[in-house]
Amino acid sequence: MARIEPLRAVRYEPATAGPLERLIAPPYDVIDDDARRQLLARSHHNVVAIDLPEAADGDDPYQAAHDIYAGWQRDGILVREERPALWALTQDYTGPDGRPYTRHGFLCRVRVEDYGAGRIRPHERTHPEPKQDRLRLTRATQANLSPIFSLYPDPDQLAWAALEPGTRGEPRAAARDDDGTLNRLWAIDDAGAIEAVQAALAESELLIADGHHRYETARAYADEIGGEGEHRYVLMYLCSLADSGLTIFPTHRLLSGLDEARRERLRETIERDFEVTPLASPDELEPPAGTPGVAFGYLEAANGRPVRLTLRSQDTADAALAGRPEPFRRLDTAVLEAIVLEGALGMSEDDISHLRGLAYSKDFADARAAVESGRAEAAFFMRATPVAQVQEVAATGESMPPKSTYFYPKVPTGLLFNPLA
């Protein structure tokens, strides 16, 4: 079973580092060069300096991360807690659907395990390049700089019930991120509360929602060091599958580089395999939750007509995904990948992973504008994958296509660090 432990966290000391809002950052994989510069303009102690390190004159950026991280600890910018604790985290946010939510969870350290039933499961495919980068950074800093986001079954919310009394006072730290999410942290070091949380999760299987590359990096690092010790654990944010603030939103697919032959194959596949329903407005492109069968919206720059595509027969998906588990064959993103991206357009898994002719957008308005402006030649508008379907696919041991889920909001980097030595 997954082993949940409190941690003696390393954290920013506001008296020397400044306000936490200037120090946190989004996860590394959504930060481009401009965003990195903007984050460092807020504070030269912003976590991006070590999470996405750069070095002058061709020096080793990972050595730079090591030097900065060590220097911040030496200078009191970062301090280590005296007592191990679970860190309750609430996130007040407005979702992409415009509705307000509060998500409840906690930061802890979890023993690194191989994937498997009853322990820890992935739900999406990963690629080697990010893992090599994160491994080199972990070696340099000997710390987890950002948490992996995982889910656990707790229908009665026993874990949060044990933590909630500790959140009634002022938080230890609070910061609003660039998306407007208010993140608030409380250190829960009461032994009874910690034991109650551990008991609630004693039989739980953890499902990684976000951070697959970081988890696989942690596993590689633990095996590389060998033996027992703090390196056998990884920083995680855990949220109950029953939490009222847990939401998943869709990620839309944008196509480019369509020559006439590929356009024709795409049209033929759509006409053969899908019911095509004209829509009154592009505002209706994202299929409503609960729409039966496999369905997605489709908009092509060449004609500008919004339509909904609904798979004519599940037999088509079963044939295209032969040998895959039944829950996987009913997944919108898997069917789109097999029948359209790989089938009609001839994309390989390597093309998809390296975004050759494919891009993603988490924002409906941006995806629509991409087609209407000509930035993309066509777009498929996806609906959110329900949490229950994510669980069903993960339980089979199958990994979903990239960007099948968009868990919102992200957990910022810089709230806490987990030392590995």
Image: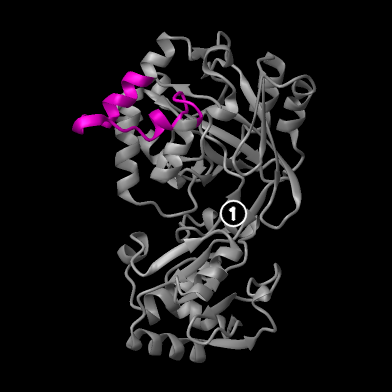
Camera sees residue 228 = no
Residue 60, compared with residue 276, is above or below; it is above
Q: Residue at x 40, y 29 (%)?
A: 49
Residue 365 position in % (x across, y down): 60, 65
Q: Residue at x 33, y 66 (%)?
A: 356
Q: Categorize mark 1 by other alpha carbons within 10 Å: few (<14), some (14-19), many (20+).
A: some
Magenta segment, which residues? 42-68
Q: Residue at x 45, y 89 (%)?
A: 267
Q: In what element is the residue under mark 1?
A: helix
Residue 25, compared with residue 385, is above or below; it is above
Residue 365, compared with residue 256, is above or below; it is above
Number of disc labels: 1
Q: Nearer the viewer, residue 293 or 264?
A: 264
Place residue 280 in its image quadrant.
bottom right
Q: Is residue 58 magenta?
A: yes
Classify residue 1 as left or right of residue 174.
Answer: left
**Which residue carries the number 1 mark?**
391
